[in-house]
Image: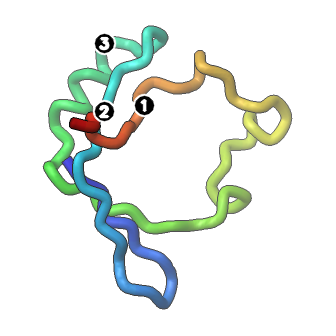
Amino acid sequence: GSFEVQRSGKLPDICDGIQAHLSTCASPKVLEVAKKFPPKVQLEEISRSSSWPMQFQAKCPTEENIALYFFAKDAL
């Protein structure tokens, strides 16, 4: 799929060829939700400090907190 990233005051950036991969720590519900993602996911860039969960303020996230990884498409 692709990401369309909207940044304040700029034209959106398109990132094509995005692949999602489940974490080994992910619950089965993550796969159900990921299958429903549209081909193009629209994102808005915001500061981490305004969106970071409170539990991550006190203790940094680990791989156990990540359910879905996003990677660029495979190189040919």
Q: Residue furthest bottom?
A: 9
Which residue in the structure is indicated by mark 2? 20
Q: Secondary structure at mark 2?
A: strand
Q: Residues within 10 Å of mark 2 (few under 14, many from 20)?
A: some
Instruction: Please state which of residues 66 and 15 is positioned toward the viewer in this rendering.
Output: 15
Q: Which mark is residue 28?
A: 3
Q: Residues within 10 Å of mark 3 (few under 14, many from 20)?
A: few
Protein image colouring: rainbow
N-term mark: 2 or 3: 2
Instruction: Verify CB contact (< 8 Å) between mark 1 and mark 3.
Output: no
Q: Amino acid at mark 1?
A: Tyr
Q: Which mark is residue 69?
A: 1
- Point 58% across, 24% down: residue: 65
Instruction: Please state which of residues 36 and 5 is positioned toward the viewer in this rendering.
Output: 5
Mark whose residue sits in front, 2 or 3: 2
For the residues labelled 2 and 1, the Cα–Cα distance comes to: 6 Å
Q: Secondary structure at mark 1?
A: strand
Instruction: Verify CB contact (< 8 Å) between mark 2 and mark 1.
Output: yes
Q: Is residue 48 left or right of residue 39?
A: right
